[in-house]
Image (cartoon, grey):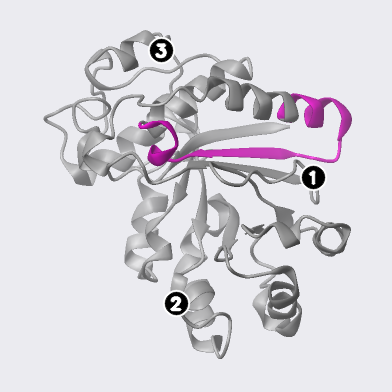
Amino acid sequence: MQLYIGCSGWSYTTWQGPFYPSNLENKQWLSYYSQIFNYVEIDSTFYRIPNQFMVKNWARKTPADFRFSAKFPKVITHDKKFKDVERELSLFYDAMKPLKDKLLALLIQFPPYVKITEGLEALKQYDFFFDDRFRYAVEVRHPSWFSDLAYNFFSNNNICLVWNQLDRIQSPPIVTSDLLYLRLIGDRSIKENEFGKIQKDRAQEMEYWSDKFRATQENEKSVRAGIVAANNHYAGFGAATANMFRVMRGLPSVEWGMQKEIENITEMQFPDEQASYRKAKQKTLLDYTSN
């Protein structure tokens, strides 16, 4: 199972200093980030459908082996609740085409009030909803979904049921496709101006999920890829959380910020022969909690 571990987004001003060098322009952040981690979840697509120029830039600024997932726009999932969304779906799919070869999945996030009956009806109603150019992952937040009815539906359609860790709900670690997708979300108690260092000890939770990844890797040979997306709200610093999970899974720690020299990242383009990303020794957890 190939692991893709990273963060929910990369464009955080409070990361400048703790993660991005202070003299690095924000237009260079994705290029820099993609030298540290091999994956990122695009959060901005939830708030508005991007244009193709922006999506082409995301592809151009990252190495060939770098991977993305992208959240479905909330106008589809939350505002219109999957009703009369043909136009929005078409716009979204067309916008994401330039990134198709680097997309692990499109993430469909149901609001927490959507129960299984309403949600399955929405997913079953539209044949056009699942464009076979893309892979899909579905995140649910109502406990009515945690049943064989949902698991069988997702398994029969090879759709990934997202594992999520919030403070009030934790999804069961059920494998429904050849893709695993874990979202470490937490709650909203950590303020945005506090991002950039670990604020909460989540090690025990993370060990639990790391064990589930290990068990899947050992017992589910059909699972080809595993995604972990760490949110800043989870522990305070998504990059540190992602790095801790890497180490738990036996991957080398990574370094960033003032520890890492800026090398060849200015508006860089990545041909196929530059497909590797950097891996190096990282500071300990104490370095994130003591500042």
Q: In which quarter of the image is residue 138?
A: bottom right
> Which residue is depicted at the point 65% across and 66% down?
133
Precedes in sequence: disc 1 or disc 2: 2
**Which quarter shows the C terminus?**
top left
Q: In this view, does 276 lie to the left or right of 226?
A: left
Q: Where is residue 209 in the image (x, y as percent from the top left)?
A: 66, 30
**Which quarter shows the N terminus?**
top right
Q: Residues within 10 Å of mark 2 (few under 14, many from 20)?
A: some
Residues at marks 3 and 2 touching, judged by CB atoms closer than 8 Å? no
Q: Disc 3 versus disc 2: distance between alpha carbons?
A: 39 Å
Depth check: 280 or 275 in front? 280
Precedes in sequence: disc 3 or disc 2: 2
Q: Position of residue 176 (x, y in %)?
A: 81, 51
> Of the residues shown, which amino acid type is indicated by label 2?
Val
> Of the residues shown, which amino acid type is indicated by label 1?
Ile
What range is drawn magenta here?
Answer: 213-236
Q: Is mark 1 on a helix, strand or loop?
A: loop
Residue wearing tag 3: 285
Q: Is mark 3 on a helix, strand or loop?
A: loop
Residue wearing tag 2: 75
Q: Is residue 33 left or right of residue 27?
A: right
Residue wearing tag 1: 174
Does 258 appear above or below 274? above
